[in-house]
Amino acid sequence: MDFYARKARHEGYRARSIYKLEHINKKYSMIKKGNSVLDIGSFPGSWLQACKDFMAGFVLGIDVKPIKNIAGVNFIQADINSDEIFEKISIYRKEFDCVISDIAPKTTGNMDQEKSIDLTKRAYDIAKVFLKQNGNFLAKVFQGKGVENLFEYIKTDFEFAKVTKPLASRKRSYEVYIVAKNFKGAKNNTIYGKNKVYRIK
């Protein structure tokens, strides 16, 4: 167990990833007091805990796995690749100040990096529907082929964007985080699902 894992256990957090978000938020002010936050890929819930520590307002988490209840946090158990995910989110909130994602594929050693890019792109496609003007986006992705294109795809919609690796990331880890601030892109409220087209109003 490394330093951050021990620290998380001692301080009552569910995972060491709490400190990745803490470091990024301290440096880039992604989440501010009273902000509404959508956390994509929430399991086991440490980033949701962090959002409450940052005194965020409305907080909604999504994951395909169930998580134990966190006071003051809403949660949807669902697959983000499903068509229905947009409607499920919109029941709770139509807009968010910040969308964050620590989502990652099950690591098998086979195509993990490509799967990571697909998941992060999906997280951003969801963010484009729900981000407020001047909102912020933060997402993890595994380094490798395609990351530069993904970064450029996201970067064009924000006034500021950067790839960073927080102190709490393990040195051997291939993960990096895309930090994007002040959303200026047009909201994409028309959803083209596999079987239908609908709008989030």
Image (cartoon, rainbow, N blue to C red):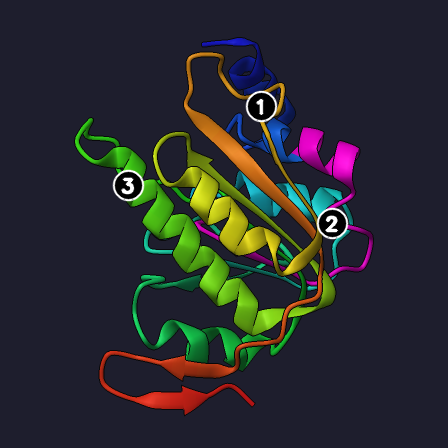
Q: Earlier in the sequence, mark 2 or mark 1?
A: 1
**Is residue 141 highlighted in magenta?**
no
Query: Horizontally, is 27 left or right of 70 in the view?
Result: right
Specify the amino acid type for callout 2.
Ile
- Cα separation, mark 2 vs mark 1, equals 20 Å
Image point (60%, 51%), residue name: 155
The verdict on residue 24 being magenta is yes
Residue behind mark 3: 114
Dot placed on the residue nearer the N-terminal end, 1 or 3: 1
Q: Is residue 176 left or right of residue 30?
A: left
Task: Give the class, few, some or many, for how many residues have Cα within 10 Å of label 1's Cα (few <14, many ≥20).
Answer: some
* Foreground label between 2 and 1: 2
CB-based contact (under 8 Å), mark 1 and mark 3: no
Residue 155 or residue 59, whichever sits in front:
155
Query: What residue would you read off at disc 2?
Result: 31
Q: Would you call the spot at circle 2 few (<14 residues within 10 Å), some (14-19), or many (20 or more)? A: many
Q: Residue at x 24, y 79 (%)?
A: 194
Please tell me in which quadrant of the rendered image residue 94 appears.
bottom right
Give me the disc on residue 8: 1
Magenta stretch: give its range: 22-41
In the picture, which quadrant includes the N terminus? top left
Residue 190 in sight here? yes
Amino acid type indicated by mark 3: Glu
